Each structure stands twice: as C-alpha cells, then as structure tokens.
Image: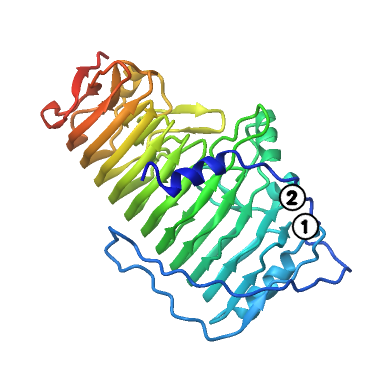
Amino acid sequence: MKASLLSALALLGAVAAIPNPGTGNNGKGNNKTPHTPNSHASNRPNVHAHPHQCKKPSPNPPNRNGKTCTVQTYGDGSDDSALVMSALQKCNSGGHVIFAANTTYTIGTALDLTFLKHIDLDLQGKIQFTNDTDYWQANGFDFVFQNVTTFFKMGGDDVFMYGGGTIDGNGQVWYDLYAKDIYIKRPVLMGYDGLTNSIISNIVLRYSPMYYHFMANSSNVLFDNNDISGFSASKNVAKNTDGWDTYRSSNIVIQNSVINNGDDCVSFKPNSTDMVVQGLHCNGSHGISVGSLGQYVGQFDIVENILVSDINMYNASDAARIKVWPNSPSALSGDLQGGGGSGRVNNVTYQNIYSENVDYAIEITQCYGQKNLTLCTEFPSPLTIENITFRNFTGTTSKKYEPYMATLECSSSTVCNGITATDINVLTPKGSHQATCLNMDETTLDVTCVDVKV
C-alpha cells in the first residue's frame, strides 16, 4: 500500500491550499432568495468491512424509495444552515439529500442532527463552517470529556453519507487563536452522538479546528475511504487534530483512509469496545492510540476487543501506543490535566504495522502527562493492561530516541500481564533493536530490553 493511491492522496492533501474564510450570519434573518443548484444523484458505493470486521455484521443500508431533495443555497457566503435543515427534515425517513457539486454551503449555526434515520446524504459539493469564533464557542455542542465541543452533532439510525465532497472547518483562524489562548473551545469538525447502523464513505475533511471526528454513544458505524488533511499556513501549528476519537461506542470500523494530521491518527478513548481499524495511511500523527485513559478520578475506563491491522505510519511520534495517566495529579498542558482514574485495557492487537521516521514503533506508558517517573512508580496506576499483542512490525524509527526503537513501561508489575511482541523487525537509523522496559515479562517481547532505572 506504500506506493498506492492512498500515498498520492496523502501528498496532495498535505499541500492543499486553505480557502478564504466566510463569515455567514449565524442564523440571523435573511431576506435573500435562495436558489436550487443543478444536481444529480451519485452512484451509491458498495461498502463493507474488509478483510476484518466486528462481531456485528457491517451496516447494510437499504435503497431509499422516498423523496430526493437538493439543498438550496444563497450562494454568497450567507448562512445556509436553515436551508440544510429544511432539506434534511423534508427527506428524512427514506429519502435522498443532495449537496450539489460545484456548490459551497456556508454553515454559521450549530445544528442538532440527531433526528436522522433511513436517509442518504449525498455530499458532492463543499460544506464550510464560518470563522465566527465567538459564536461557535458560545453555541457549539459540548461533551463532558476533555472539553470537547462540536460544530454540529449527527445521530439517529441508518444514515449513509457519501459523494466525494468536502467538509471544511475553516481551521486557520482557530490555529492562530489557540496560539494566543489555550483555553478557547475549539470545535470538532464531525461530531456524532447516538449514531447507529450507519456508513460514512468517500468524504474529504479539511482544516478542523480540533479533532476531525468525535464519536460518542454510537454503535455499528463504518468509516471507509475518507481523506483527512489540514495544516496551518502560519507559524501557529494545528494542534490536537486527531483523525478519529471514539468514546462510549462499540462496533466501529475505520478503514481504507488517508490521514495527514498533527495528533493521534485514531484514538480509542474511554469505553471503546469491539472495534477494527485497518488499511490506513497515517502521516504526521501520534499513532494509533489506546487512550488516554485514567484521566478522571472515580471513572472506570474500558478499552477492549480492538484490532488494528495493516497500517502505514509515516513521520509520527508513535506507531502503536497505549497511554494511561498515573494515579496522581498530572498536567500535560494547561488545558489538559488529569490522573487518578482506573479501568482496564484488554484484548488489543496491533498487527502488520509499517513505520517510517516514527519516534517509537511501540509505546506503553502509565505515566502520561507526568515527567517524573519516580512519582508514577510511587503512585502506580490501578488501570490494568492485559492480553496485548504486537505482531509483525517492520520499518525504521527516527533518530529521536536512538538507540531505542520502543518503550514498554508499566508503573507496577501487578497491572500489566499477557503483553507479547513477536516478529518486531523495526530498527533505529543506527540499526538498534533496543527498547526501554519497566515491569514487563521480557521473555515474551521480541525486542532487546534495557531495564529502566527508577
């Protein structure tokens, strides 16, 4: 897959130009007359989880036999939110909604789309959110976890979204604002709350202010053939731009996609179970991550039954990572603090992972957000990490941690069990196969362990 179309798409996405931001009017009265663009229906893609799938069969949306609605637009950068909502309500429950090609729809109002059911969303044009940062901070949809807020939230049952169009988060204004004030609320581009039995396929996502996807309270959803990219055009880096974050969700498949970003390619947040991630090209990320977990005192976090397979990871901090907060207060940054929670990570497999210029091929830490390793061992995390498999890793690391190509460190020998690493053929630039190890059964690890001194 390294020389595949995915690689070409990744390069194109990384250098895409940021469009001029619109402003909209945030749902205020509009006396203009909208128009209906010329449109046609896209061919529905045939999408299934392959080669691996979750316990539940892939969603299989039936054909729609109801109305077809083409979304109207004012066409001048005014807020099209009411027009979008009108089309969705009119063609819900069996219809087909078309966002016309060569058309930009401006969204300046937070939309609650959790009512959707039995509907095709055929996105051929572009949806662009306005750059009114004051409005979005005051009106986005807030989630309790890690200060997440979203432009909109999509939920319901049997939603099939496709079409090859673009959703643009107008991120540059947010990257610059965050550099001035780390406590601003940056919206997630694609927010899901209570979505079931649905498919999101062949969508282009650009310039999210924060995560690209945040999936909460959802199940049996398949993401396929999506293209994510968005880098800053200024000196202010686009931060926390995770590709996918799953939270309190199950039976999710993420596959066959390109991700150019600046944080986790995929992150399994608390209570993510029964998931498959496969066939991804990740560039510039922090890897495929379990966690972070154990952030909140009194919370019991679960991540289990996860398969990560056939991943190409380039220019990243990690390829495979499990990150757990210690059992003491810690601060990764002013706007991200935690520690003291518990839970379990169980039955997680990473296999067929290729790395190139990745700092660590494998990382396990129970000292996330805390630089004092002694403190982490004095107050070890009670969160258990068990039945973890790393299998068939190839490639090279960066020189950052030379001579170490991996780090596997648990804060206590009682909480980490059944961790195996086989066929680990990753070397540092100088040819080293060493890894730092702490509280590990080194007989099950196909790396050259160097014990960490605390």
Question: Does residue 267 appear anywhere in the picture?
Answer: yes
Q: Position of residue 347 (x, y in %)?
A: 22, 47
Vertical relation: 135 (above or below) 362: below
**Which of the pair 20/83 is nearer the observer?**
20
Mark drawn on residue 228? none
Residue lying farthest to the right in this orientation: 31
Asked which quadrant contains residue 101, the reply is bottom right
Q: What residue type is labelled 2?
A: Tyr
Residue drawn at 60 percent across, 31 percent down: 237
Quickly name the residue at label 1. Answer: 26
Q: What residue type is labelled 1?
A: Asn
Quickly name the residue at label 2. Answer: 135
**Which of the pair 446/137 is nearer the observer?**
446
Vertical relation: 15 (above or below) 74: above
For the C terminus, the quadrant is top left
The reply to whether discs 2 and 1 touch (Cβ–Cβ < 8 Å) is yes
The first of marks 2 and 1 along the sequence is 1
Residue lying farthest to the bottom in this orientation: 65
Q: Is mark 1 on a helix, strand or loop?
A: loop
Residue drawn at 52 percent across, 66 percent down: 161
Asked which quadrant contains residue 112, the reply is bottom right
Disc 1 packing (10 Å; few <14; some 14–19; many ≥20): many
Q: Where is residue 154 in the image (x, y as percent from the top left)?
A: 55, 63
Q: Distance between the residues labelled 2 and 1?
A: 7 Å
Vertical relation: 310 (above or below) 370: below
Question: Does residue 366 appear anywhere in the picture?
Answer: no
Colour pattern: rainbow
